[in-house]
């Protein structure tokens, strides 16, 4: 599925399968004398396009984080969406990573999966991580979201969600998956993610189990 922003689409770029050449309810004709411009119109979204899964955005507030005793206690779910239109309506009205405060973590996970190692779906999982220069992760974050919610991964069932982390010197995007020991699935996801991001640098996969036991000493189990 291509998750295109209806607010940014023209009729020429995004043929509406339900529309013929004549204007339909919900379309606004553009002015003009010649035949082609008189038929040009702006399609307004008059139907919703359901996604395969519902997804939830979560935010971990950096100022609350510094005061918390337990990791994750300041994390809040902020919006659940189930259609292309709901996704764009929230995405177009929230800060993108370059506008978030240092320390922020912004997550998008399949509904009912909490972005925590302890979540029953994540517990045997792991994550691929890509590091970006500070303030340079906006486009890759959007491309990650579109690939996930548009079900672009061959092993999409393996995906739990993604998180962008804004830190003092860099941004990071991590893609969380369910079965870390399924090497073939993880490698497929990592390689496809690199293509979607048009990213050629190194990428490592850490098992949550290792991160739990070893914290920052956890090593990549897979690298591509
Ligand atoms: P992190 O936020 O994944 O790494 O984990 P980062 O971004 O390199 O570190 P930061 O300090 O810049 O945020 C950092 C630490 O948070 C881990 O070592 C854990 O102590 C804790 N932590 C992170 N996650 C994702 C979890 C989690 O899911 N559950 C629990 N219990 N602790 C976590």
Image (cartoon, rainbow, N blue to C red):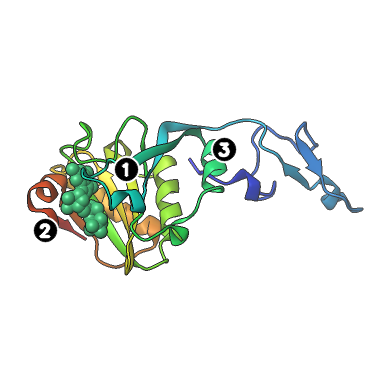
Ligand 1 closer than 8 Å to label 2 CB: no
The kind of secondary structure element at disc 2 is: loop
**Residue 125: x, y in percent?**
19, 41
- Label number found at residue 18: none
* Residue under the point 24% across and 40% down: 116
- The crowding category of the residue bearing disc 3, from other C-alpha atoms within 10 Å (few below 14, some 14 to 19, many at least 20), is many
Q: Is residue 186 visible?
A: no
Q: CA distance from mark 1 to mark 3?
A: 28 Å
Q: For the point 53% across and 42% down, which residue is it?
A: 90
Work out whether residue 141 or residue 57 is closer to the camera in this orientation and state it: 57
- Report the residue marked by disc 2: 219
Secondary element at tag 1: loop
Q: Position of residue 26 (x, y in %)?
A: 75, 34
- Give the mark nearer the N terminus: 2 vs 3: 3
Residue for badge 3: 85
Counting from the top left corner in percent of width and height, residue 196 is at 39, 55
Q: Earlier in the sequence, mark 1 or mark 3?
A: 1
The CA distance from mark 2 to mark 3 is 39 Å
Front of the two marks 1 and 3: 1
Q: Residue furthest right?
A: 33
Q: Is residue 208 left or right of residue 89?
A: left
Label 1 environment density (alpha carbons within 10 Å; few <14, some 14–19, many ≥20): some
Residue located beneath label 1 in the image: 74
Residue 40 is left or right of residue 213, and the answer is right
Q: Give the residue drawn at x 21%, y 45%.
A: 69
Disc 1 C-beta below 8 A from ligand 1: no
């Amino acid at each position: 599925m291509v998750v295109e922003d209806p607010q940014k689409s023209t009729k020429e770029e995004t043929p509406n399968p339900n529309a013929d050449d004549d204007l339909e309810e919900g379309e606004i004709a553009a002015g003009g004398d010649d035949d082609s411009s008189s038929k040009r119109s702006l399609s307004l979204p008059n139907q919703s396009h359901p996604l395969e899964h519902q997804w939830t955005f979560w935010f971990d507030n950096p100022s609350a984080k510094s005061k918390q005793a337990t990791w994750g206690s300041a994390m809040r779910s902020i919006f659940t969406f189930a259609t292309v239109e709901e996704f764009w309506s929230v995405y177009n009205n929230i800060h993108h990573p370059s506008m978030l405060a240092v320390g922020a973590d912004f997550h998008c996970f399949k509904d009912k999966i909490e972005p925590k190692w302890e979540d029953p779906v994540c517990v045997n999982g792991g994550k691929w991580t890509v590091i970006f220069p500070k303030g340079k992760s906006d486009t890759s974050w959007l491309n990650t979201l579109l690939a996930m919610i548009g079900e672009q991964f061959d092993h999409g069932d393996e995906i739990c969600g993604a998180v962008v982390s804004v830190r003092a010197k860099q941004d990071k995007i991590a893609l969380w998956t369910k079965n870390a020991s399924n090497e073939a699935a993880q490698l497929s996801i990592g390689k496809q993610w690199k293509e979607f991001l048009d990213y050629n640098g190194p990428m490592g996969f850490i098992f949550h189990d290792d991160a739990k036991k070893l914290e920052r000493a956890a090593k990549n189990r897979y690298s591509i």
